[in-house]
């Protein structure tokens, strides 16, 4: 299957366009958008006019504003197509350091049936993805599959995007609940994890410390009432002597 799919450049760069022109087009428009700004996805005509003045002298071409507008639409289509590829169930990894998307042939066949243009990413990932996220992804939803988030950090070597068939494959962005311990009282914690509450003491009894450890709660034994002094000979005794202890007259 590998030998039947053309290289990425066959899909992206035809006629007057080369990769460096795409990079300059996106970077210049991002700079102008940050400086001037515009609402929505509609780009003002004067923006294309100014971008044309930057690109044409650099590469010795004669692009029109319409050429730039069409190319920008194609770049947006590439961005959406690549997002679809990496979010497809069965795609195991997006290896950023190798700039490839890893999936078996059966998954690629399914992707090609749904979007033939996705074949552009069989040999390599999207070369302008970082610029595209800034340009087209401002109002876009993050690519998430089962709460697993794609990270664009260059320090991350392997990113698992979907449920992987690879044993012990790393999963990013997923929360795992710790096994519950029936003898443990869990204090409230921040985050969406389930909170565990346990009634430590009876509400009618004294409550000295509501933050208990793992030990069983203490039991309180009511004190016995004593009607006579345990030391009958004590001069500080206030209780009367028992009948059996009275001194004969």
Image (cartoon, rainbow, N blue to C red):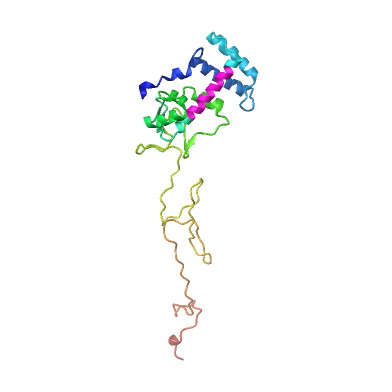
* Rendered location of residue 178, percent (x, y): 42, 48
**239 to 206, vertically: above or below:** below
Q: Nearest the camera: 3 or 211?
A: 3
* Rendered location of residue 146, percent (x, y): 46, 40
Q: Nearest the camera: 232 or 162?
A: 162
Residue at the far top in the pictured view: 60
Q: Is residue 19 left or right of residue 106?
A: right
Q: Is residue 77 magenta?
A: yes
Q: Is residue 196 left or right of residue 39?
A: left
Q: Is residue 157 visible?
A: no
Q: Nearest the camera: 34 or 133?
A: 133
* Rendered location of residue 160, percent (x, y): 41, 34
Q: Residue at x 64, y 18 (%)?
A: 45
Q: Nearest the camera: 2 or 179?
A: 2
Residue at the far front in the pictured view: 113
Residue at the far bottom in the pictured view: 249
* Rendered location of residue 183, percent (x, y): 41, 57
Q: Is residue 117 magenta?
A: no
Which residues are drawn in magenta? 68-83
Q: Residue at x 44, y 23 (%)?
A: 120
């Amino acid at each position: 299957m590998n030998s039947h799919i053309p290289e990425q450049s066959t899909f992206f760069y035809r006629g007057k366009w080369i990769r460096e022109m795409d990079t300059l087009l996106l970077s210049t428009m991002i700079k102008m958008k940050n400086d001037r700004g515009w609402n929505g996805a509609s780009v003002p005509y004067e923006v294309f006019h100014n971008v044309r003045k930057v690109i044409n002298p650099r590469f010795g071409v004669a692009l029109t504003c319409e050429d730039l507008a069409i190319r920008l639409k194609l770049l947006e289509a590439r961005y959406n197509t690549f997002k679809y590829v990496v979010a497809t169930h069965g795609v195991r990894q997006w290896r950023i350091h190798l700039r490839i998307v890893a999936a078996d042939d059966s998954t690629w066949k399914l992707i090609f049936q749904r979007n033939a243009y996705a074949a552009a990413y069989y040999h390599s990932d999207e070369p302008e993805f970082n610029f595209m996220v800034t340009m087209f992804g401002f109002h876009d939803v993050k690519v998430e599959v089962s709460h697993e988030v794609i990270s664009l950090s260059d320090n991350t070597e392997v990113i698992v995007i979907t449920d992987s068939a690879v044993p012990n494959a790393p999963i990013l962005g997923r929360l795992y609940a710790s096994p519950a311990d029936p003898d443990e009282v869990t204090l409230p914690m921040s985050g969406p994890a389930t909170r565990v509450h346990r009634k430590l003491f009876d509400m009618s009894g004294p409550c000295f410390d509501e933050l208990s450890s793992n030990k069983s709660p203490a039991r309180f034994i009511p004190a016995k009432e004593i009607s006579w002094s345990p030391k009958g000979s004590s001069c500080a005794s206030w209780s009367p002597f028992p009948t059996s202890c009275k001194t004969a007259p």
